[in-house]
Image (cartoon, coloured by chain):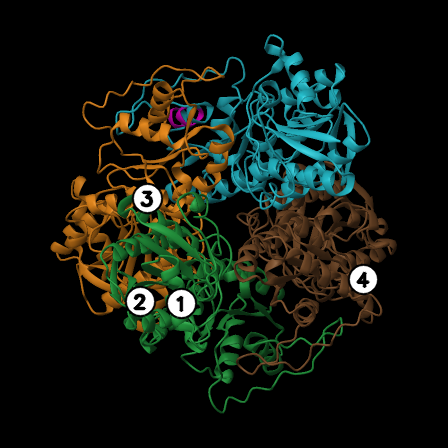
Chain colours: A cyan, B brown, C orange, D green
Amino acid sequence: MRVGVLTGGGDCPGLNAVIRAVVRKGVRTHGFEFVGYRDGWKGPLEGLTMELGIQECRGILPRGGTILGSSRTNPFKIDGGVEKIKENLAADGVDALVAIGGEDTLGVATKLADLGVHVVGVPKTIDNDLSGTDFTFGFDTAVNIATEAIDRLHTTAESHHRVLVVEVMGRHAGWIALHAGIAGGASAVLIPEQPFDIEALCQQVEDRFKTRYAPIIVVSEGAVPAEGGDMTVASGEKDAFGHVRLGGIGDRIANEIEQRTGKEARAVVLGHIQRGGTPTAFDRWLATRFGLQAADAVADGDWGTMMALRGTKIIRVPLSEGTAELKVVSPEEYAEAQVFFG
Amino acid sequence: MRVGVLTGGGDCPGLNAVIRAVVRKGVRTHGFEFVGYRDGWKGPLEGLTMELGIQECRGILPRGGTILGSSRTNPFKIDGGVEKIKENLAADGVDALVAIGGEDTLGVATKLADLGVHVVGVPKTIDNDLSGTDFTFGFDTAVNIATEAIDRLHTTAESHHRVLVVEVMGRHAGWIALHAGIAGGASAVLIPEQPFDIEALCQQVEDRFKTRYAPIIVVSEGAVPAEGGDMTVASGEKDAFGHVRLGGIGDRIANEIEQRTGKEARAVVLGHIQRGGTPTAFDRWLATRFGLQAADAVADGDWGTMMALRGTKIIRVPLSEGTAELKVVSPEEYAEAQVFFG
Amino acid sequence: MRVGVLTGGGDCPGLNAVIRAVVRKGVRTHGFEFVGYRDGWKGPLEGLTMELGIQECRGILPRGGTILGSSRTNPFKIDGGVEKIKENLAADGVDALVAIGGEDTLGVATKLADLGVHVVGVPKTIDNDLSGTDFTFGFDTAVNIATEAIDRLHTTAESHHRVLVVEVMGRHAGWIALHAGIAGGASAVLIPEQPFDIEALCQQVEDRFKTRYAPIIVVSEGAVPAEGGDMTVASGEKDAFGHVRLGGIGDRIANEIEQRTGKEARAVVLGHIQRGGTPTAFDRWLATRFGLQAADAVADGDWGTMMALRGTKIIRVPLSEGTAELKVVSPEEYAEAQVFFG
Amino acid sequence: MRVGVLTGGGDCPGLNAVIRAVVRKGVRTHGFEFVGYRDGWKGPLEGLTMELGIQECRGILPRGGTILGSSRTNPFKIDGGVEKIKENLAADGVDALVAIGGEDTLGVATKLADLGVHVVGVPKTIDNDLSGTDFTFGFDTAVNIATEAIDRLHTTAESHHRVLVVEVMGRHAGWIALHAGIAGGASAVLIPEQPFDIEALCQQVEDRFKTRYAPIIVVSEGAVPAEGGDMTVASGEKDAFGHVRLGGIGDRIANEIEQRTGKEARAVVLGHIQRGGTPTAFDRWLATRFGLQAADAVADGDWGTMMALRGTKIIRVPLSEGTAELKVVSPEEYAEAQVFFG
């Protein structure tokens, strides 16, 4: 059997570990041949291929990013896209596809599977917001990087009696903020699922200064103030070099705290360093096991399934289960650690 | 309510995170007072106490070790030990105990619970070999440290065309070796559950050198050769300084490979660096959640229970479940990643 | 003798290592007593003191920040400030001061020394821009953090065929950018000392994409475009959440590259994580040796001197030498590594 | 001009950074062509070559080890070795050699230069014991790894009231032990240059336990007891698995302390993890600058020179200067930090 592999969406530590495991298991146990499709769905759409065998996968386990490249191309948004993919797969002699990606990439995979394409999916999201699996790889790496950053910021906050606001990834789900906030000993964690009350937050800041510790506030990039939360729009301020320094929600909150409490506040936006570089051991282990299972799923002809972690087992669930709805932080999960916050 | 807390057995990254969470949740939500017992069961046995409140727990989240100290004291092996503990608890006005520890410490807790002492347990083992919970804290830290060491050793092995044998912790269970071996891209993983065949191992070593990569072999300290495996006893050799260099199973395997294959082989014994220092984000998060749940278990009077991770939930199981038998690597789990080995 | 110690200006990994070394050497070898002044020059100005002995310094060596706190208070800008300091020193029975700080803090120390106050200085700047010393502590830590971030970003840049612009500290001197750029394998390094040509930079970006590697551009926060460099003012753009995303020079360059080359470009601003947290071994070693030497300088009554590294030796130079002019990157030093850039 | 490059002796983080810089500068600035010789002096001796150009050097900057491989082959110990090298260089059309290595490799280079071979040297030693240069690359990485290990061990030592002995590299010079001991806050540092008094050491251990901190002793692998120091020969003891656990000086000291003081003591031997893996920013910067300078030295025909760091400058010194005698820790340097020890 000839199997194509592609990676789509934002990069994520562990992608290469999945690729390596699929290929190793596929070649050694099942006798598959592999074709690498470049740059997500763009690969099968435009016939962009690369050699992919055990040799190409040597040494990639600890490397971030993806040797296959990635893109956000969606063949369903392109006229004749799906047909083009089917033609290219046929032309390449490819019988099955392993699609590694997040909501969008797996959404495409789900529809293609419905149209009869032989595809299995491997879930990938830094944000950990895919349903059907306990965790996705990349998330543990992101949380560790954010936690190390928070560790570093504590001493700065204390030495300068200053508030530090750390903006982490998480557009729709606050998992990174919640886990890194708990692990880093944050004073407050603000997530998209729970609109925040800026006044209550400022009160927490003032209370925190009554201990000898300074507050660290961890905020998801997608966090929003509660309605009526009267946040001053930070705009137009310039820094020492004449640049306008505004930024996202982290900057706005820092600015707001400074204005309301009179305490110095600074924002740090972790950005892309959360998603690059070598994966943690957990993510390499999880990604590897997803890859091994995906090769078996192909061998079993178990099309339309997605690999998932449940407890310590890797299982297969319908692709639709993973992409039906976002996994967000529940009120109970958010409440669990509230004794540390405020 | 007045609650005692103790930590027993070998130290483990995350112990302080548990202590902090129990105290924070206990004080803030349940209005408990706390007493710290020093040095494991020796504390309540000899009446060694320390102040333990929110203040004492500030700043300890990222710190390895345990602020309470530890020991391997077993009150059931001491004449009148149990009575002494009961007397001291009564004298200190302590109504309940939170015991944080491994097989031995929780074994004592189980028996004390049977004798009517109000005790809840928090499982702790670097080796991850306690039943009833998906993972224990400290394990992820140990695996990451071992994986980073393996990452470092790859380039040395390749530059010198040399075999490197990495001995990791794991007396009775091979979890650290298995996870770090998968995550580090090892060529072979030897665990206590599966006696190894030294001849087959040497064959793998020679095959590996046919690629341009040099072999890294990860071995649990408790790994043993299969019966009849004719290992030369390494003994009496001296190094450049006249010291006898023998060591444990790692050294013996390196020595054996060198003699059988003619390839240079060296052992690295990671030892205590696997169990010290700051916990990973995962371990801080898990330890914190165990602590929060333990405080609730005390509030609920749910004596004789142990905190456990199942999937992403923290649940309570009977203490006896955690201590009844060791959780070891099953043949299926060992086989899962065999495509990378050999 | 009774000796006061203070730390001023921005925090910097290694401050606690200096404090610990001054105290240990002062007490053990010279029999000094110590007084900690809180929050930089604000301490002696307002009489804010704390206990400072060997006990207070235990465990602080690996900790970032400063146990003494810091501020940017300048007594020469306060009416009667200098007199107030002299009075407080006298009232506290303090015969000599060890002032640890950067240009501003040591500038005050220089003037106070001229006015007869017994003071020795220890140079501190993340930016490494103090004259008279080969390196300052904190710099090596900042460079390592920036280098690790660049390491992480390479794989993201490559996977997404994207330009990444990394903004690092350095208002007036480009040392962090230069060292991290060399160590991280950047495609370009932009520093305050050398106004950059945005057109040439965009050309480099396009050339880089002809290899299979994507460009990483490291830029000091104080870098400026060459005159006539026609940079579009990035303003008013909004992100997915409706926040204005503008930021400093890093953001502006990323925006400009995207507009001119059509390649996706993103900025990462490392900010405060460069200055917090545990110091590297080099910084702990350097800071410790500065502290030891400072205690000896006090014992020798060598007032008005500053500790400095020359090669591998710690020497003393006049405070004025360290504060007379900024140490910037020379054109030769900038040119040295140009073969990697462009 | 056609230039050969080789790396000899033990591997060391930064070797690849040197290779990359020599090649980049040589090709871009001087128009050289390069030949890679494999496995140290074995390469030109046996005519083992590999392609070496800008392409081969992409991505190697952060990688440990050496893409050229290494060996300890000495052509002066092989009949006709030198002639063979001359013949092979001529056959390969190689006009000049860049030899990267330690005492042995550069010793060969020195003699070859005397015999008219066009060679320049780049000093390499983890141990930092080459004369003529302030620091060698690889040393900073080793010191950081040792320091991180010590950081981790502190909490274990304290939690268990246990002595931990950390054996680090350093056969003839104690630089790694001294720097890591200072940076890690060790209680004692034992180096080859200063035979240690086991009785005084045990006294220090007992004094240390009077504080609440437990002792960490850092010892160079080449440290030796003072004459008459009556150390029990540790021999024949077996561990829980029946293996003889003896080892080097670290194990012997731990054993001795345990017997003399009754305190539990354990040794950790860091071994090869000190020399593998990614270099620190300092080592990448230093190695890169050595490489740049070496390319210029070749262009200048400055044969028989070795690159060296003096302060912040890279200079050239005669090869003989670097290899004439070992750079060891002077009594003054050892004494400098004694206030922390004991």
Q: CA distance from mark 2 to mark 4?
A: 55 Å
Element on which disc 4 rests:
loop
Location of mark 1 (residue): D85
Disc 2 marks a residue whose amino acid type is Val
Q: Dot 2: few (<14), some (14–19), or many (≥20) neighbours within 10 Å?
A: many
Q: Are marks 2 and 4 in contact (CB under 8 Å)?
A: no
Query: Is there CB contact under 8 Å for labels 3 and 4?
Result: no
Instruction: Name the subunit of mark 1.
Output: D
In this picture, residue D308 sits left or right of residue D73: left
Q: Mark 3 and mark 1 in contact (Cβ < 8 Å)?
A: no
The extreme bottom residue here reads D228
Q: Closer to the camera, B161 or D114?
A: D114
Discs 2 and 1 carry the same chain letter? yes
Name the residue: 30% across, 68% down: C32
Please give the label number shown on residue C176: 3
CB under 8 Å between discs 2 and 1 = yes
Label number found at residue B195: 4
Near mark 4 (Cα within 10 A), the count class, few <14, some 14-19 or many ≥20, is: some
Read off the chain for label 2: D
Tag 3 subunit: C
> Residue D175: image x %, image y %?
40, 69
Badge 3 amino acid: Ile
Identify which amino acid the numbered label 1 is placed on.
Answer: Ile
Asked if badges 3 and 4 are on one and the same chain, I answer no
Q: Secondary structure at mark 3?
A: helix
Residue at x-position 56% and y-position 35%: A67
Q: How far across and down, in percent of the image, does residue B245 sit? A: 62, 76
Residue at the disc numbered 2: D117
Q: CA distance from mark 4 to mark 1?
A: 49 Å
Residues at marks 2 and 4 on the same chain: no
